Amino acid sequence: MSLASYIGCNIELPINADEYSDESLYIGRCFADEENLQNVKKYQFTTPYVYEVSSHWGIEISEYMNQETCAESKVKLLELCKRMNGYLKQGDYFELYSCWVGEETEKREGEIILEINNFDIDQIEIPEKTLVRFKK
């Protein structure tokens, strides 16, 4: 199984059609299929547009995971927030949700609200099945 990360937002985003991009983070498919995207949209997000954030592994920040993978997730999350900050207008938001592929319909284990430009990456924890809303 693979850990996938999804974002939901109120605007359409440009996507990368190359699922094997060398970028460490891009918006486009990697693990998920159309059914996974529809399920995460229906069961987890409040937004009309949903995308997989492909990075060859999902974004998860937890003290219980491999520290190298956790450090990579922090870098990916900061890059994602930087990119989304460029797309969003003041007062808008995007949502992030990571889970194992096929578990998109399962109950969330947590919810967090953060300001897109005002959080300490070393003080947050985002385990799988946690919905994070980033407000601008």
Image (cartoon, rainbow, N blue to C red):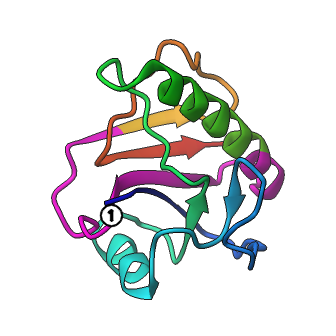
The spot of residue 13 in percent (x, y) is 73, 71
Q: Residues within 10 Å of mark 1 (few under 14, many from 20)?
A: many
The residue that mark 1 highlights is 44
Res 31 seen here = yes
- Image: 115 above or below 58: above
Figure quadrant of residue 21: bottom right
The spot of residue 125 in percent (x, y) is 39, 24
Residue type at mark 1 is Gln
Res 116 seen here = no
Task: Give 87 or 101, whichever is nearer the viewer.
Answer: 101
- Taking 99 as reference, is 6 left or right? right
Q: Residue at x 43, y 29 (%)?
A: 61
Quarter containing the C terminus: top right
The spot of residue 51 in percent (x, y) is 57, 70
Q: Residue at x 59, y 21 (%)?
A: 119
Quarter containing the N terminus: bottom left
The question of residue 11 being in magenta is answered with no
Q: Secondary structure at mark 1?
A: loop
Q: Residue at x 22, y 70 (%)?
A: 105
Outermost residue toward the right in this view: 86
- Taking 128 as reference, is 34 left or right? right
Outermost residue toward the left in this view: 107
The question of residue 99 being in magenta is answered with yes
Magenta-tinted stretch: 83-111
Q: Residue at x 28, y 48 (%)?
A: 129
The spot of residue 2 in percent (x, y) is 38, 58
- Image: 131 above or below 75: below
Label tally: 1
